[in-house]
Amino acid sequence: MGRKNLYIIIGLMVVALSYLSYEQYNLNKELEEWKGYYKSVAISYVQEIMEAPELKAPIAEEMSTTLVDFDANLLQFEDLEGSQFSLRDFRGKTLFINYWATWCNPCLAEMPSMVELYNQYKDDKNIVFLYLSKEDRSTIIDYIPKDEALAQLPLYKIITDDELFSTRGIPTTFIVDTSGEIIVKDVGSATWNDQSVIDYLNNIL
């Protein structure tokens, strides 16, 4: 085989590889678009069937204890800037704690209603909203541009978990009163801007 023919073959291989890489890029791009479309459809469906939360206290079978010991509790978390906190920092406050994740469509479905609720109380120093995820901080930060609601909420990455807030799944929301008593445990998506929730919070505040 002559050198010229060899160069031609190498050139054709380079062209073929470039074409395959381009097609793979397009395929991956289309796949991401379809995944995004599916996610938005799934979230919309959940939003269609969501109802107001029942606002019931956890039963004994769900939690062995329902009282937060602020001296012993080990739940620590950090905000998206890396500042660290623990429940001890919020002793004497009413706590609204939501467990969520970027991959959890039911979690994302309830976030717009969470924003409306949060905006009503964000200036009230007697209540603290904590949206906690076990995901990496970078994962949360990278996902925020895809969801306008998340950008408006106080989001935190869990550092050390505590069995007190164990749950069978997410989203799960807890409300803790000023004495540390867990007075609400709600599992699943809900419309948290419902008037029943507002009336409930106003009553305990």
Image (cartoon, rainbow, N blue to C red):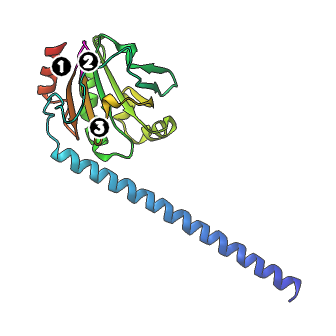
CB under 8 Å between discs 2 and 1? yes
Mark 1 and mark 3 lie on one chain; the one further toward the N terminus is 3
Q: CA distance from mark 2 to mark 1?
A: 9 Å
Q: Secondary structure at mark 1?
A: helix
Type of residue at label 3?
Thr
Please state which amino acid type lies under the numbered disc 1: Leu
In this view, which residue lies farthest toward the right?
3
| Extent of the magenta region | 176-181
Q: Identify which residue is drawn at 66% across, 72% down.
A: 17
Give the residue number, with chain letter if any, for mark 3. Answer: 167
Is 53 rendered above or below residue 183? Answer: below
Q: Is residue 63 magenta?
A: no
Q: Is residue 136 left or right of residue 124?
A: right
Tell me, yes or no, whether the highlighted magenta stretch contains residue 180: yes
Q: Secondary structure at mark 2?
A: helix
Query: Which dot, 3 or 2, sits closer to the camera?
Result: 3
Which is nearer the eye, 169 or 13?
169
Query: For numbered disc 3, what is the local secondary structure?
Result: loop
What residue do we see at 40% from left, 14% from top? 89
Q: How many marks?
A: 3
At a point 37% along the width and 19% down the height, the residue shown is 87
Q: Which mark is residue 201?
A: 1
The residue at the point 55 percent across, 69 percent down is 23
- Residue 85 lies, with reference to residue 56, above or below; the image says above
Q: Residues within 10 Å of mark 3 (few under 14, many from 20)?
A: some
Q: Quadrant of residue 135?
A: top left
The image quarter containing residue 148 is top left
The earlier-in-sequence mark between 2 and 1 is 2
| Distance in Å between CA atoms under marks 1 and 3 | 22 Å
Between disc 3 and disc 2, whose residue precedes?
Answer: 2
Residue 180, image x, y percentages: 26, 16
- Callout 1 touching callout 3 (CB < 8 Å): no
